[in-house]
Structures are given as C-alpha cells and as structure tokens.
C-alpha cells in the first residue's frame, strides 16, 4: 500500500514542529483575510469579493488544512470547501436559515429531539475551520450564539427526565474545540444518566487539525465507552499521514469510527472520486456512514447537485467495492423530517410466490418465496411484548406492527366531513374500526385505526 501524503505550505516551512504540531498554535494562527490567504495562494476575483463582503459567514482556516490546497488550482476541492466565493452571496429557491427545523424541534436550546430514542446535543458554536456549506451557519461561528452554562444544564435536565433517550450525539460547532475539562465534564454528566446507553461525538477536527487527537484526549474518551466517533471527510485529498495517525489513536482507544460526507458540486460529485474516498477511509479503519445531499441552507446553493447524482454514485459503489465501504445516501428532509435514505432500485417486480431482482451488473434473477412460511407471532415474543415506547413516532413500523390501519394527515377527518353535521350514517363509529388492528380510541374520540394527527 502506498503511504498517505503529508503536506505543508512553503509559508509554514520554517515553523518549528513543536508549534505546528500543537493544536492550540493551529487555532491561534488561523487564516481569515485576503492578505493572509495570499501568502499561500493567489485568490480569484470572486474569492476576494466574497472575503471583502460584509455579513459573510465566518472564515477561519488552520495552517495545516490550508496547506492541503494546491495553490495552482483554482478548482482545488479543498479550497472550494473553505474559501468563500461570490456565489455564496446569491440566494436560491428553497433556501432557509434553518432548513432542517432543528431549532423548532429543540425542547430546550441546543438539544434537538427529532428521533424517538436519541438526541443531538449542540455543545458549542465554534469550529476549527468553517465549511462554506455549513447547515448551522445561523449560529456556528457567531460568538453571540454561544451556549451558556444555563443552556447546558437545561439540556442535561431534559435528558435525565426523558427515559426514552438512550443515545446522545455531541455536535455543534465542533465538540473537540471545547476546553478539554469542559468536554470531559459533559461526557461525565451524560454517563451518569442510567438510561443513556450510547455516547457519540461528531467532529471534523481530526480532518482540519489532526494534532488535536492526543494521547491525553484518547485516554479521556475511552473512559466513557461505549463511545462512537464520526469524522467528516469529503475528498481523498483530505486523507493524510496526520489524519491516519489521529484515526489510529482513536481506534486503538477502542472507539469505532464512521465518516459522514456531503455531496458537493465541483468537489466530490463523481463516482470515481467517491470510490477512491471510501476505499481510502476503510484503510484508516473508518467506515463510510452517510453521504448527505447538500442542505437547502443559505449560501450553499452553488454546492447543490441533483439528487440523482447521489443515486448514480451509490450505483457506482454497490458491488463495485466492499459492501462495508458503501455509505447510505440520504436527503435530510427540509422542514425537519430527518434523514431519508435514497438508493438505486434493485427490486424489479414480484408475484405471490417470487420476487425479481437485479444486481450491480444488470444480472436479473428470481427468488422463490416460501409457500409454507409461518409468520412470527408477536403474542409469544417477549421482545414484541416489551418493545420500547416511541410516542407519536411509530410511523410505518407501527402499521406493520398492527398498531393502526392508516397514517392520516392532521385534520384529514375534519376536511372530509365537509362541514356536515352528525347524521344517522355517522352515528356508529365502530364501522371504521378494522378487526384485530389497533385498540382503544385516539385523541379525537374516534377508533384508533390511524397513526395520524
């Protein structure tokens, strides 16, 4: 195997290694102005215009990360991710400040409870470097939006008093920019909550500033197992000897690693770039986890691709490389619906006794279904009898479990009453209750045959 590269920009060549390998020095020497960037590369007129524009989303780049840019290439994939252009200033149809409705789905500031058994805990608004497509640009990088001790206490209190939460993901901003003692305090407080089983950290610091992953950090993190860690690599050029060292330290501490990428026009919207990326990631013992469609966030319009591009990429990965190297492509639903997986269609047709499928090569086959299958009996299954509660969020799974017959939009019944009053054909509500499906009544006093509003 060929070794991973290590690069340093000429302007930093004479910096002593004890400084350049110190994450605090990296943070203190970040580049953010026209004059600083032009010590490393020649800015385009579009980049100069953006950097000189008032109200621009924050710009900060570590010396380590800016050194990965090819200064002769204005279309360098790393450059595009962190140096703004004038395109960032243009609005586009559908853009929103909070496109995922995270703040709407936060019972307390900075705690997003979208899924039944897990929460997203925003612990800081600061990052080592600011991605130009950041979905939380509304708060990230703004010192005025920093979460206070009071917010942190409210987050912990909500988790303590919500026993259905078993999984807490720390994000921000970037948790690894926190003071080490504060990060340890947060993890300690969460681990003290009996029903919290899994702790997770989402961080791009190992990519932007791998020297932050010290032995002291990994020694501290491994005290809180089971703890999972997701990094964020978008392009093979971001995979370096330094990142390999950082991920090695994390995996040796027993921390499983995943990677989340964002599909970005002009950066990684290519099957062969993505294939190289995932193959390099698994060399680092990092499993590709998600490939996200770019969000409808302000300033990111020029990064967006058609959703079909993501499907094309998965088509070029599944079967063409190891299965564990294929991420899930998903659209994080605008308006707050959460992650929706999107993939090529492999199921072609079906009858009552066989299904027709195709593989990555176009090979078409049939699978004969069993004719004597004895269905699973929930009445005798202890897991079915003691399933975790997911109030109001059972969705399609609830239909399959026989909890209801339908999912109806809010106000569906009222709309279809069409203003009419009670009459003799509406008197018996039992006529709409399916035998053996659902039980009791819903909030409207109607038979509980729907999981809708």
Image (cartoon, rainbow, N blue to C red):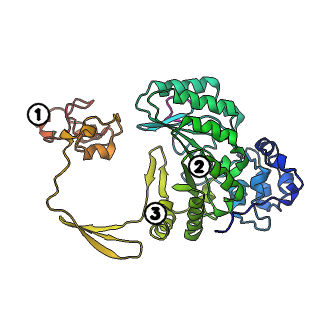
Instruction: Name the image quarter holding the C terminus.
Output: top left
Residue under label 1: 428
Is there a contact, CB below 8 Å, between mark 2 and mark 3? Answer: no
Q: Nearer the viewer, residue 171 or 421?
A: 171
Q: Is residue 295 visible?
A: no
Q: Nearer the viewer, mark 1 or mark 3?
A: 3
Q: Quadrant of residue 403?
A: top left
Residue at numbered disc 3 = 323
Q: Residues within 10 Å of mark 2 (few under 14, many from 20)?
A: some
Predominant SS of the magenta segment:
loop
Which of disc 3 and disc 2 is earlier in sequence?
Answer: 2
Name which residue lies at 87% across and 50% down.
16
Q: Is residue 217 left or right of residue 281?
A: right
Spatial separation of the CA atoms under disc 2 and disc 1: 63 Å
- The residue labelled by disc 2 is 251
Q: CA distance from mark 2 to mark 3?
A: 21 Å
Quadrant, the N terminus: bottom right
């Amino acid at each position: 195997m060929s070794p991973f590269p290590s690069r340093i920009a000429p302007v930093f060549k004479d910096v002593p290694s004890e400084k350049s390998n110190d994450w605090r020095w990296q943070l203190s020497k970040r580049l953010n102005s026209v004059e600083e960037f032009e010590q490393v590369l020649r800015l385009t007129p579009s980049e100069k215009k953006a950097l000189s524009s008032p109200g621009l989303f924050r710009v900060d780049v570590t010396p380590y990360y800016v050194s990965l840019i090819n200064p002769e290439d204005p279309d360098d994939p790393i450059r595009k991710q962190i140096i703004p252009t004038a395109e960032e200033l243009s609005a586009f149809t559908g853009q929103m400040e909070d496109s995922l409705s995270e703040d709407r789905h936060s019972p307390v500031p900075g705690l997003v409870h979208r899924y039944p058994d897990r929460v997203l805990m925003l612990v800081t608004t600061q990052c080592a470097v600011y991605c130009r497509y950041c979905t939380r640009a509304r708060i990230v990088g703004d010192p005025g939006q920093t979460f206070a001790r009071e917010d942190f206490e409210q987050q912990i209190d909500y988790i303590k008093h919500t026993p259905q939460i078993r999984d807490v993901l720390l994000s921000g901003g970037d948790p690894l920019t926190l003071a080490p003692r504060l990060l340890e305090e947060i993890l300690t407080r969460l681990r003290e909550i009996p029903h919290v089983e899994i702790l997770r950290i989402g961080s791009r610091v190992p990519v932007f500033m791998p020297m932050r992953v010290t032995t002291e950090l990994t020694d501290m993190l491994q005290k809180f197992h089971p703890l999972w860690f997701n990094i964020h690599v978008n392009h093979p050029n971001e995979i370096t000897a330094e990142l390999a060292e950082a991920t090695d330290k994390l995996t040796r501490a027993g921390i499983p690693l995943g990677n989340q990428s964002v599909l970005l026009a002009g950066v990684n919207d290519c099957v062969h770039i993505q294939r190289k990326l995932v193959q390099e990631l698994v060399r680092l013992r990092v499993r590709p986890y998600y490939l996200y469609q770019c969000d409808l966030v302000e300033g990111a319009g020029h990064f967006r691709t058609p959703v079909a591009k993501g499907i094309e990429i998965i088509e070029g990965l599944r079967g063409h490389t190891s299965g564990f190297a294929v991420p899930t492509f998903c659209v994080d639903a605008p308006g707050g619906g959460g992650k929706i997986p999107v993939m090529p269609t492999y199921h072609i047709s079906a009858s009552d006794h066989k299904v027709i499928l195709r593989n990555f090569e176009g090979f078409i086959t049939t699978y004969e279904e069993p004719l004597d299958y004895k269905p699973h009996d929930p009445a005798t299954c202890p897991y079915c009898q003691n399933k975790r509660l997911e109030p109001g969020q059972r969705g399609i799974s609830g239909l399959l479990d026989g909890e209801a017959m339908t999912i109806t939009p809010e106000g569906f019944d009222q709309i279809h009453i069409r203003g009419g009053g009670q009459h003799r054909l509406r008197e018996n509500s039992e006529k709409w209750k399916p035998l053996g499906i659902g039980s009791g009544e819903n909030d409207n006093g109607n038979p509980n045959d729907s999981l809708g509003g």
